Amino acid sequence: MKHILVTGGAGFIGANFVPYFIENNSDYHLVNLDLLTYAGNLENVSEVENHPRYTFVQGDICDRSFVEDLFQKFLFHDVIHFAAESHVDNSISGPEAFIKTNVLGTFNLLDTARKLWMSAPNQYNEAFKNARFHHVSTDEVYGTLGETGLFEETTPYAPNSPYSASKAGSDMIVRSYFHTYGMNVVTTNCSNNYGPKQHDEKLIPTIIRKAIKGENIPIYGDGKNVRDWLYVLDHCKGIELAFKTGKSGETYNIGGRNERNNLYIVDTVCSILNELQPKSEGKYQDQITFVKDRPGHDLRYAIDATKIENELGWKADENFESGILKTVRWYLEKFKNK
């Protein structure tokens, strides 16, 4: 049985991916490495904690000797790398952790994998001849868009926050290991994910949490920032597809083709709540308040997913309206007992 390392598997996207991958890939034993900082939570993967093909390890990808020991212990055949500091607001107030984790951490994983898998540039050891390193990244590396246009894989990088700059740096290191060493790598850049298991402070969980508590629902600026919303399980399916069938050295953009601005998001969530859990008087929309915009807040992101659709056959199963209904129901259940 092959061992696969999934980093950041207790975070939002990773914790949706881990049970999905275990269920669909009986030839793999999955090791979930997570530092369990503010975004990681073992409750997110409780459904697999006793699975025979699952092991959880708490540790830091910035600790080189720890990473090397882990690779020696499990002899990982593949890596899918989610682990990252990812909350943009936090990157503004404390950028150092983002540079360390996202740049140095990615380098540690890549370089350790290279030394286990390869004997020289373009020469894989026989036991690892099909070994692959899959790097999960974001559309924020491309910067911001005007009112038209889409991010393509060929769009020049123009990151605007310490978070997106650190992710751009990690993408470039992954790229360099393909071009310099002939390492089998693939990168996916995704649009805004939503769905179960997201950190409570993110936009959609915050709207739901504040709404049902009767508190003000804060929206940045004028609420007209546009994001391309991707249901997290659709993203997981795209990652698995690119990991298994993507071409080495290539990048694939994964997006939902669901551009919505924040005003639309908050109104839609409130409307669903009005039906599922109506207030005694008034509507949840009455709680919406506008707060000062965050610095460097990109106006619009949107992804052109044509490449992964045409070359690998991926398509999103959920549209925003179907995905958001599932999401609201999940959080209502979660917050019910809080």
Image (cartoon, grey):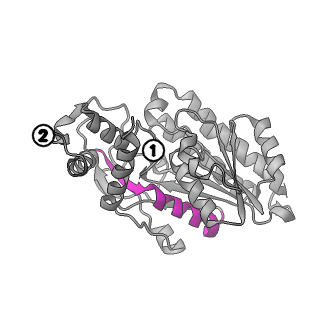
- The one of 150 and 332 positioned closer to us in this rendering: 332
Mark 2 crowd level (few <14, some 14–19, many ≥20, 10 Å Cα): few
Q: Is residue 102 above or below residue 153?
A: above
The residue furthest top is 93
Q: Position of residue 189 (x, y in %)?
A: 51, 54
- The one of 209 and 9 positioned closer to us in this rendering: 209
Q: What span is in magenta?
A: 225-248
Q: Earlier in the sequence, mark 2 or mark 1?
A: 1
Q: Is residue 6 visible?
A: yes
Is 237 part of what is drawn in magenta?
yes
The quadrant in which the N terminus is found is bottom right
Is 260 part of what is drawn in magenta?
no
- Marking on residue 50: none
In the visual, does 91 lie left or right of 333? right
Residue drawn at (20%, 35%) of the image: 287
**Does dot 2 land on a helix, a strand or a loop?**
loop
The residue furthest left is 282
Q: Is residue 298 visible?
A: no
Q: Amino acid at mark 1?
A: Gln
Q: Position of residue 114 (x, y in %)?
A: 78, 52
Residue drawn at (60%, 39%) of the image: 102
Q: Which residue is mark 2?
A: 282
In the visual, does 225 lie left or right of 38? left
Q: Position of residue 8 (x, y in %)?
A: 60, 44
For marks 2 and 1, give the CA distance: 28 Å
Q: Which residue is mark 1?
A: 198
